[in-house]
Amino acid sequence: MPELIPILKRDEIAIKVAAMAKAISRDYKGRRLVLIGVLKGAFIFLSDLARHLELDDVKIDFLRAASYGEGTRSSENIHLIKDIDTDIRDKDVLIVEDILDTGLTMAFLIEHLKAHSPKSIRTCAFIDKPERRKIPIEADYVGHRVKEGFLVGYGLDFAEDYRNLPDIYHLKID
Ligand code: IMP
Ligand code: MG
C-alpha cells in the first residue's frame, strides 16, 4: 500500500498562495493579465490564487499538456491535448502550474504560447522540485520548494488519484 506522509497542511498552503497572489498583484498592477492554468493539476491552485488577486482585468483559460502517464516517471514527449481559446495577443500571460519538475512541460508551453504573440509570459508554480530538472528553467513565482519525492494532493495526482486532498503529501511506494 502506498504511504502518505504529510508535508504541507492546508493552512500553510493558504498562507503561501496568498503571498504569491500579493506579489503577482503588485507586479501586474494596471495591466491586463491572462492566467493560463495547466490541467489537470493546477485546477485547485489556480482557483485559490485567482480569488486572491487584487487586479481589475484578469482573464482565465486552461490548456492541457500530456506529460506523465500512469506512473511517476516523466515523459520527454510533451504534447498538447487542449489549447487555450482566449486571444492572448498583446496581453500579459501567467502560466499557472501545480509543480515544476523536469521543466519539460513548462519549456514546451512557453514556446507554444509565444507563437500567439503575447506581450509577456511569466510562470508560476505552486511547488518547485529542482532535483530532476532537465531544462534550466525557473518559475517567476514559487509557493514552496521541495528537494525530492513524489507529491500528491492539492491537485497533484498519482495515476489520477489524490487530487482532491486539501493537504499535500509525499507518496511513498514500496
Ligand atoms: P515536468 O514537465 O517534468 O516539469 O512535469 C510537470 C508535470 O508533471 C506537472 O504539471 C505534474 O502534472 C507532473 N508532476 C511532476 N512531479 C510531480 C509530483 O511530484 N506529483 C504529481 N505530479 C507531478
Ligand atoms: Mg499532472
Image (cartoon, rainbow, N blue to C red):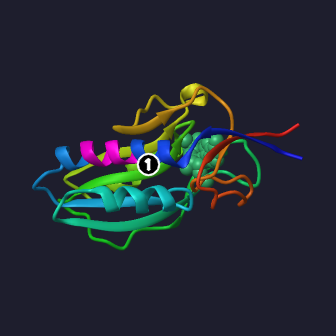
Residue 34, picture quadrant: bottom left
**Which residue, as the protein is rendered here, is positioned at the far left?**
30
Local crowd at mark 1 within 10 Å, few (<14), some, or many (≥20)? Answer: some
Classify residue 82 as left or right of residue 51: right
Q: Which residue lies under the disc numbered 1? A: 14
**Which residue, as the protein is rendered here, is positioned at the far front?**
11
Classify residue 135 as left or right of residue 87: right
Viewer-side residue, 136 vs 25:
25
Viewer-side residue, 119 vs 13:
13
Q: Which amino acid does label 1 sit on?
A: Ala
Classify residue 33 as left or right of residue 40: left
Q: Is residue 107 visible?
A: no
Viewer-side residue, 21 vs 100:
21
Relative image position of residue 165 (x, y in whole percent) = 64, 57
Does mark 1's beta carbon lie closer than 8 Å to ligand 1?
Answer: no
What residue sits 44% from the left and 48% below the top? 14
Q: Is mark 1 on a helix, strand or loop?
A: helix
The magenta segment is 17-23
Q: How many numbered badges does the structure rendering display?
A: 1
Residue 9, picture quadrant: top right
Dominant secondary structure of the residues highlighted in magenta in the image: helix
Q: Quadrant of the C terminus?
A: top right
Magenta region includes residue 22: yes
Vertical relation: 134 (above or below) 66: above
